[in-house]
Image (cartoon, helix red, strand yellow):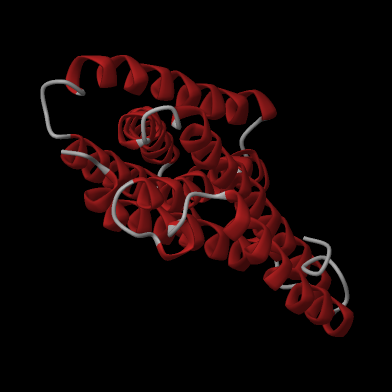
Amino acid sequence: MLGLTSPPFPGLVVVTAGIPLVLTGLRHTLPAGSLLARSGLPSVVAAAFFLNTAFYAASAFVPLLLVRLMDVSIAAAGAAVSAGTIAWSAGVWLNTLLVDRYRRSLLLIGSALLLALGTAIFASALAGTPLPLAYCGWILAGFGMGICFNTFTLSAMVMAPKGGEGAALSGRNLTGSLGTAMGTGVGGAAVAASSSLQVGLRPALAFVYGMSILSALATAALARRSSPN
C-alpha cells in the first residue's frame, strides 16, 4: 500500500520488496496450498480474497461515483449504500433456506456471478445509465455478496480437518481481510493517480469497477473447487 501511494520509482521498489514478504508470511500462515488455490479448503481461502476484493473495492467508491459523477446528494448516495447492506442481509437470510437444499458449489457460482452482474450494472452509470438502474444493480450485488460470503464461511468449517475449524476459519478471514485492504487500497491508489495526472475520476473508477468484476468472476471460477458438494 505504501508503494502504491509513493512516487513511481521508489514506489516500485517498495512494492517489489513487499510482495515477496507478504507471500512468505501467507505461506506460513494459511492452509497449505492456499496460494495455489488447490481444491478443497485452500480454494475456499483463496476465493475469500477475490470475493472481498470484488465487493469492497466496488463498495468503497459507490458514494464517490454517485456524488461526483452522477451529481446526486449525499443522502441519496447513502441510500444506495444502505440498500446494498440491506440486500446483503436478505441474501444471508435466503442462504439459510437454500444451503441445505442445493449444492453449495451452485450457490457459490450463482451468487458470485450475481455479484459480478450487479457490479457491472452499477458501474454502467459511468457510461450514462439511468440512476434507478444503477441502484438496482448495487442491490443485486449486495444480494449476491450475502449469499456467497456466508456459504464460503460454512464451506470452510465443513472442509476443515477435525479439530482444525478455528485455523480454517482464521485463514478464510485473513485472506478476506487482505482482499478488503487490497481492493480498497489499489482503488484509492488509482483515484489518487487519476487526480495527479488530471485525467478525471471516470478512468480511475472504470479501473476500480473492472477490477471488482474480474475478482467476482475469479471467485466464481474457484467456487466449484471450494465446496464439498
Looking at this rendering, what residue extends furthest in the bottom direction?
9
Closest to the observer, 165 or 203: 165
Q: Position of residue 177 (x, y in %)?
A: 61, 42
Q: Please report the residue visible at 68 percent of the width from the left and 47 percent of the height from the top.
A: 68
Q: Is residue 101 left or right of residue 161?
A: left
Residue 201, position as x, y percentages in the image: 67, 61
Q: Position of residue 41 (x, y in %)?
A: 36, 45
Q: 144 or 178: which is nearer to us? A: 178
Vertical side of 89 occupied by 153: above or below? below
The image position of residue 61, as x and y in percent, is 62, 45
- Figure disc tally: 0
If the image is split into quadrants, where does the C terminus sit?
A: top left
Measuring 60% from the left and 45% from the top, which residue is drawn there? 180
The residue drawn where x is 28% and y is 58% is: 221
Q: Residue at x 42, y 41 (%)?
A: 134
Q: Is residue 80 left or right of residue 149?
A: right
Q: Is residue 70 visible?
A: no
